[in-house]
Amino acid sequence: MSALVLGVIPARIGSSRLPRKPLFPIAGRPLLEWVWRRAMGIAVFDAVVVATDSAEVADACRAVGAEVRLTDPAHPSGTDRVAEVVRAAEYAGFEVIVNVQGDEPFLRAEHVEEAVRLVREGGWELATVATPIRTRAEWLETSVVKVVRGDDGGALLFTRAPVPHPRDAEPDFRDDTYLRHVGLYAYRRDALLRWVALPEGRLEQIEKLEQLRPLAAGMRMGVAVGPPAEGGIDTPADAERAERLLWNQSTPPPTERAAE
């Protein structure tokens, strides 16, 4: 029998670039509702729960039928928020956990499925997703996190720097050598709890990338390569872009699980 999969959407009310981000209205719905609805439509999840530090966000979630859990507002990261949920007795039966970013209304089912497969069947403690970089501008952009994979498909490095960096030629973006990290994580339960117990590492402090913490500690993270996806929502300009895209899509009906 396959291990049960729990999707957790961490949603912090504070945001420096987009105030009250989870509740920010996009195409007639709060951003977080779009994310939750997208996650609820992904068949690999046996359950989906929102983890938030805000009673207001929790009330908004309950109003649309979402399962929600209030978590400690002092958590330094979404990963810590996910771990608090996983420690609760009612979620003890879930062996695979997926951290769904709360600002990703265009989450792709195939990305989730591949990350889960790497943990369920591939023997990885942790798994994430990357998509090919196709332009020099994207490769050079420091806001784009790059990942370098080993021959076994595992992560060797996450960085904001343009890597790999060819010594004697221009980079060739026609294959999957140059990869952009997608901030989606699948974990074995024990691996997630080990991750959050680790101290913040020096590489993590320098790059401001929390995924460097388990990597530096020797934890193994598989990287699935998938098709490109729309970016997350960090700024008002991102919200405008998402609104245009979502208005062009049909309004999603309530999911069966939401109606139960």
Image: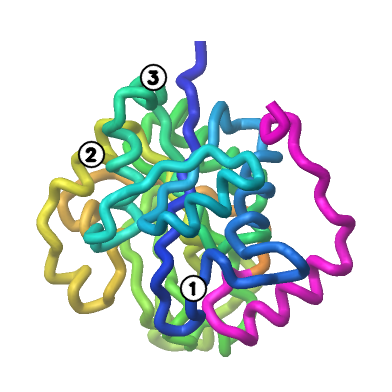
Identity of the residue drawn at 14% across and 46% down: 197
Q: In this view, does 195 lie above or below 227?
A: above
Earlier-in-chain disc, 1 versus 3: 1
Q: Looking at the picture, how far across and down is residue 199, in whole percent?
A: 10, 57
Identity of the residue drawn at 64% across and 63% down: 30
Range covered by the magenta-colored residues: 231-260
The answer to which of 156 and 130 lies nearer the viewer is 130
- Secondary element under disc 1, as helix, strand or loop, is loop
The answer to which of 238 and 60 lies nearer the viewer is 60
In this rendering, which labeled residue sits more in front, label 2 or label 3?
3
**Residue at mark 1:** 20
Measure the C-alpha gap from mark 2 to mark 1.
28 Å
Tell me the amino acid under the disc marked 2: Leu
Tell me the amino acid under the disc marked 1: Arg
The answer to which of 159 and 234 lies nearer the viewer is 234
Relative to 171, 248 lies left or right: right
Q: Looking at the picture, how far across and down is residue 2, in whole percent?
A: 51, 17
Earlier-in-chain disc, 2 versus 3: 3
Relative to 26, 177 lies left or right: left
Magenta residue check for 29: no
Q: Residue 193 carries which label?
A: 2
Magenta residue check for 237: yes
Is residue 181 at least partly visible in the picture?
A: yes
- The residue most toward the top is 1
Earlier-in-chain disc, 2 versus 1: 1
